[in-house]
Image: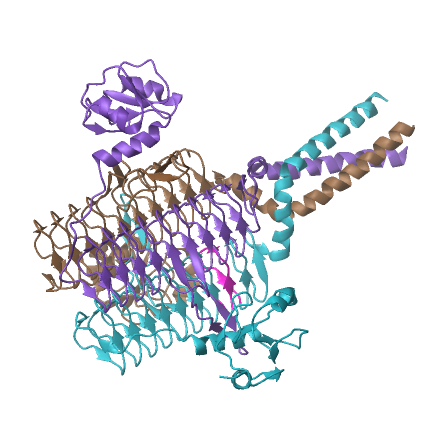
Chain colours: A cyan, B brown, C purple
Amino acid sequence: MNLGDIAEKVGGKVIGDASIEITDVRSIEAAEKGHLTFLTGKKFLNKLKQSRASAVLVTSEQEVDMSQVITPGPMLAFARLLDHFHPQARPRPGIHSSVILGENVVLGKRVTLSPLVCVGNNVEIGDDTVIHSGSVISDDCTLGKNTVIHSNVTLYRNSIVGNQVTLHAGVVVGADGFGYTIDEQGRHVKVNQIGNVVIEDNVEVGANSCIDRAAMGTTLIKEGTKIDNLVQVAHNCTIGEHSILVAQTGIAGSCELGHHVILAGQVGVSDHVKIGDQVTVVARSAVFSDLKGHSAYGGVPAVPLNVWKRSVTVLPKLPDLVRKIRNLESRLSDIEKKKGEE
Amino acid sequence: MNLGDIAEKVGGKVIGDASIEITDVRSIEAAEKGHLTFLTGKKFLNKLKQSRASAVLVTSEQEVDMSQVITPGPMLAFARLLDHFHPQARPRPGIHSSVILGENVVLGKRVTLSPLVCVGNNVEIGDDTVIHSGSVISDDCTLGKNTVIHSNVTLYRNSIVGNQVTLHAGVVVGADGFGYTIDEQGRHVKVNQIGNVVIEDNVEVGANSCIDRAAMGTTLIKEGTKIDNLVQVAHNCTIGEHSILVAQTGIAGSCELGHHVILAGQVGVSDHVKIGDQVTVVARSAVFSDLKGHSAYGGVPAVPLNVWKRSVTVLPKLPDLVRKIRNLESRLSDIEKKKGEE
Amino acid sequence: MNLGDIAEKVGGKVIGDASIEITDVRSIEAAEKGHLTFLTGKKFLNKLKQSRASAVLVTSEQEVDMSQVITPGPMLAFARLLDHFHPQARPRPGIHSSVILGENVVLGKRVTLSPLVCVGNNVEIGDDTVIHSGSVISDDCTLGKNTVIHSNVTLYRNSIVGNQVTLHAGVVVGADGFGYTIDEQGRHVKVNQIGNVVIEDNVEVGANSCIDRAAMGTTLIKEGTKIDNLVQVAHNCTIGEHSILVAQTGIAGSCELGHHVILAGQVGVSDHVKIGDQVTVVARSAVFSDLKGHSAYGGVPAVPLNVWKRSVTVLPKLPDLVRKIRNLESRLSDIEKKKGEE
């Protein structure tokens, strides 16, 4: 593939030699002769000048000694070319002889069931879907097309997973929500969790994350949302479209998140909280009450981001403030005392 | 089952028509004709008035246009009826042909071992216990009666699990505690963890949670305690009876929790901490030292809840406090200066 | 083994009767006749005096009524003796008949593959390595000698694991890093993660922890580092030698940690942060920017430990500070008013 072909593929324009052959895409530091790299900000320009890359994806022409492809989104173009040069590995279709299939299983075309996969009764699996070794798909589950379930995943009964979904190893979908009431002797009595989980198209869920089934109704992960590792989504939550939940975030029961919400790492959200569209919550914050959309928040409890940023700088100075107040008190007492003596 | 039967079953009293047939139980919003719902607080009374339910569980007679069952605990009655109308699904008893059984395994009556379960040597499993696909029960484990082990669970050797216990998918019981000492070259030397884990009756553990084996002795989860997803219980902890550990909580080594302790989501507890009976710690708090019983706490480090609630409201105002102190200092300096000039 | 043999084994010196037979090692409280215990600090001396142990490991001679072994590191000696009296259990070597082996698998001597293990193509496994039930070793992985992989572990393709490594149950190595870019319609587009994970010798990783593969290049866990349960290490991180990551800690992408770093429980580290050698970060802290080596830090965001310790004591007094400032303001206004009237 030459640079001209690449420019056409990503909808860009070549500055320099369109005929050079591109053999791979790489980061600025790792690129060699024949490789295409990308520039995401002026601050990397010096690094780019020292790069051995043969060409670069840029938003506007740069003063560099290599061919350039002008495109409004160099990172997006790079991601697409990465997928071209390094497509995600997929095992050959087929049902391994060690797979356990229940009754009334409907398999689409070119499905891959790897060794030691267990599929329950009344399960439907769409075309081109891949299930890796050791995963368990319980009764009455439905999986869409082109979906990838990695190893040792558990889907509890009646879970519904869409198309082009990826569930990483160890993910648990549809375990019972954490619902109890207390009896006359102070013992916790389980409230049976009779709902389910629905995961829409193009969702990705990271390793060992958990999405609990609803008490009644559905826990819903909407289209295009990406969830990182070790995340907890409790029963009856709805996570809006194209949202991002970074690692170790936990969302308590019955929360409603809008679309394009970003919860950074280790964020917590209390139960029944509503978070508006396009909200960003920075890492390590805790959301205890509803957040309006189109804004950024931080802190425990979460407040508007600029408020949190200012208040957090004061924390290490607190002992100093205490001293200043003591000093003010003593000076003021002196004045009051003298006043009284006048 | 008519409403009279239901009232008898939950120990309640019917107001209205006891002969109406009840076909299911539902939330206020989801209930239809023939369904029974429940009221937990006056604030939901308006919703109840608009519900299509045929009857309602209440603590005292309400002015609503449907039959009522008076009971001191509507939620508890509801949970029991939910279990009646929607009992938890259990697979048929039997040992699947793909199960791997070790030597000297003693199985009770009506045990279910699902496909691809692996059971080690010298394991005892009680009557009516169910082990789902892909779970591994290592050597010398003992499981009680009526216990459910979901898929892809790992029990390390010598773990003891009681009756009516539920372990959700991906739970790890009895992995080595995190114990090292340092050698002459600054390398961490493992302290072999030779203890075990004991889980008493009626405990439930959420998906992907971890309970480590004791260094020596036993890590103990006492009767009736409920643990949510992604919780860490370190070596040598004792968790008292009927406690609640909400998702992503972590308890370091050798802690002792009393009975009816509630640790809300993402709480952390330092090692060797003692927490008294009936303590509640609110979400996201960190407990660094012992907490007296019968009280509530919050914050990092945890302090009495009312103290934390008051102090937390000051955080966003900190920059304002700094300004006020500066203002006071300058005004006071002015006065002192004038005083000096007098 | 008599006490003289033990002293020789740990490089210590006997005070008292070297001929007494030692049958086990135990904690001070649990020790019985014939047992050896250890003393780590003067504060346990009273307990030791009441212990039934026959002998004790100490740093210097104590006034106790039992034989003593003087050694500079009683805890280290104890750990080594524990390993002698209670060596870690290892299953017999051999490949179980239920194991699924791919093509071109190279197995060392005395390898153990337990039931229902799945090994992909082009995998190499070193001498004496043990893989427990239900684990999945994907294509192109390499495992060293004397390594233990516990149950239900997943190694994604191309992961490299060294010698004497222990991975506990449910660990996921090499899942895709959390990398996306956004397209013209605001949808997240996956950046294929084409790197891998390398785990060096003598590393231990706790249950259900996750180490993601690099976007490009390698996520690297260096020699001797110990990782607790439910820890997240994101793509492209380098964790230095002999470091400690305590439970539920999360490290975002492209961080570089030095050697002998200690991150206590539930710590978070933002992406691209560099942490110097021998840094300790206390539990529950969040590191948002680079930390210089040979120092301790705490807080959110992390600051030098003594600064955090002082500031944290002020938090519960914040409402009191607000009152004091109000009081100062009103007293000062009074004075200013009177001044004006003079």
> A111 and A26: which one is in front?
A26
Residue A251 visible in image: no
Residue A134, horizontal then vertical, whole percent: 24, 64
Tell me what residue is drawn at x 74 percent, y 32 percent.
A328
Residue C9, horizontal then vertical, whole percent: 27, 29
* Residue farthest to the right, as pictured: B342
Is C331 placed left or right of B211 in the picture?
right
Residue B80 visible in image: yes
| Prevalent SS, magenta region | loop
* Residue farthest to the front, as pictured: A33
> B336 and A10: which one is in front?
A10
The magenta span reads: A257-276
Looking at the rendered image, the quarter that the N terminus of chain B falls into is: bottom left
Tell me what residue is drawn at x 19 percent, y 50 percent.
B164
Residue A263 among magenta residues: yes
Residue C54, horizontal then vertical, whole percent: 23, 20
Residue A176 among magenta residues: no
